[in-house]
Image (cartoon, grey):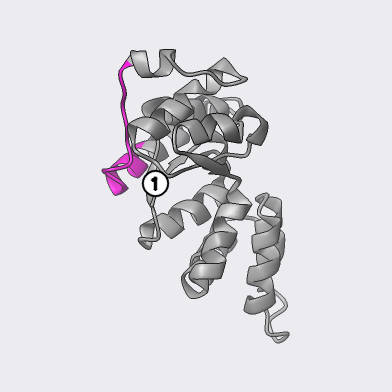
């Protein structure tokens, strides 16, 4: 399955690490464009120059780690598309150019299902996307979440718990599902 990732699911660190952790385990093929990575860097830049540089570096690492993810298209493709927000046409164009099956985005209203269906696409939010893997590949999904939790504990100033970390990352259903299976009652920090 090929999946085009909108900027709003790549920019948040924990969400990105979970979503791309699932891709790294071979559960799907991620797709993005230079424009998506540029939007991520500019959004990070609002947090400061260092954050923007870090996002640009991470974008380069993503292109290295997922060499088939980057898609390009002729301007004529984007020009023929219509969406409620003209600034989101590049996401739809990227999904079409990459032969994606799905767009993962937090902006449902900007991607009407009927317009996506005309292009053979559908959309889902990050939480629903991850929950699909929790249903089909629970062991891999729990392992990816455990690795993200370990990194958050290693690099953060907070002693994160699984449910709190994923909930803060706007993955509330995944947080509940992983926590229910991860916490055996003996490890309150899971």
Residue 166 in the image, given as x and y percentages of width and height: 65, 58
Q: Is residue 134 left or right of residue 1?
A: right
Q: Residue at x 64, y 78 (%)?
A: 181
Left of 99 or right of it: where is 174? right
Q: What is the tally of numbered marks visible in this picture?
A: 1
Q: Name the residue: 39% across, 37% down.
A: 59
Question: How far from the left and from the top, in percent, is residue 11?
Answer: 54, 38
What residue is disc 1 on?
30
Q: Residue at x 66, y 69 (%)?
A: 177
Task: Give the left or right position of residue 112, taking residue 55 as reference.
Answer: right
Task: Point out the stretch of residues depicted in magenta.
Answer: 60-74
> Around disc 1, counting alpha carbons within 10 Å, would you say few (fewer than 14), some (14 to 19), or many (20 or more)?
many
- Residue 160: horizontal and vertical position, in percent? 67, 63
Local SS, label 1:
strand
Please tell me whether residue 144 is drawn above or below residue 106 in the rendered image.
below
Left-right relation of 170 to 150: right
Seen at 61% across and 46% down, the residue is: 125
Q: Residue 70 magenta-drawn?
A: yes
**Picture coordinates of residue 42 (x, y %)?**
52, 24
From the viewer's side, name the closer residue of 106 and 49. Answer: 106
Q: Is residue 149 magenta?
A: no
Magenta residues, dominant SS class: loop
Which quadrant holds residue 119? top left
The residue closer to the viewer here, 177 or 113, is: 113
Q: Report the quarter where the C terminus lies.
A: bottom right
Whether residue 85 appears in this view of the structure is yes
């Amino acid at each position: 399955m090929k999946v085009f990732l909108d900027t709003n699911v790549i920019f948040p660190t924990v969400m990105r690490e979970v979503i791309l952790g699932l891709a790294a385990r071979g559960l799907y093929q991620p797709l993005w464009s230079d424009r998506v990575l540029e939007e991520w860097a500019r959004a990070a830049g609002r947090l400061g120059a260092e954050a923007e540089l870090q996002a640009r570096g991470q974008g380069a690492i993503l292109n290295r780690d997922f060499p088939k993810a980057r898609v390009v298209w002729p301007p004529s493709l984007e020009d023929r598309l219509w969406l409620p927000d003209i600034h989101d046409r590049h996401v739809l164009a990227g999904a079409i150019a990459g032969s994606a099956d799905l767009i993962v985005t937090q902006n449902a209203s900007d991607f009407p299902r009927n317009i996506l269906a005309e292009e053979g696409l559908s959309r889902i939010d990050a939480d629903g996307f991850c929950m699909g893997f929790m249903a089909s590949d629970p062991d891999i999904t729990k392992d990816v979440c455990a690795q993200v939790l370990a990194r958050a504990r290693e690099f953060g100033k907070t002693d994160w718990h699984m449910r709190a970390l994923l909930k803060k990352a706007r993955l509330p259903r995944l947080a509940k599902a992983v926590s229910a299976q991860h916490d055996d009652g003996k490890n309150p920090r899971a």
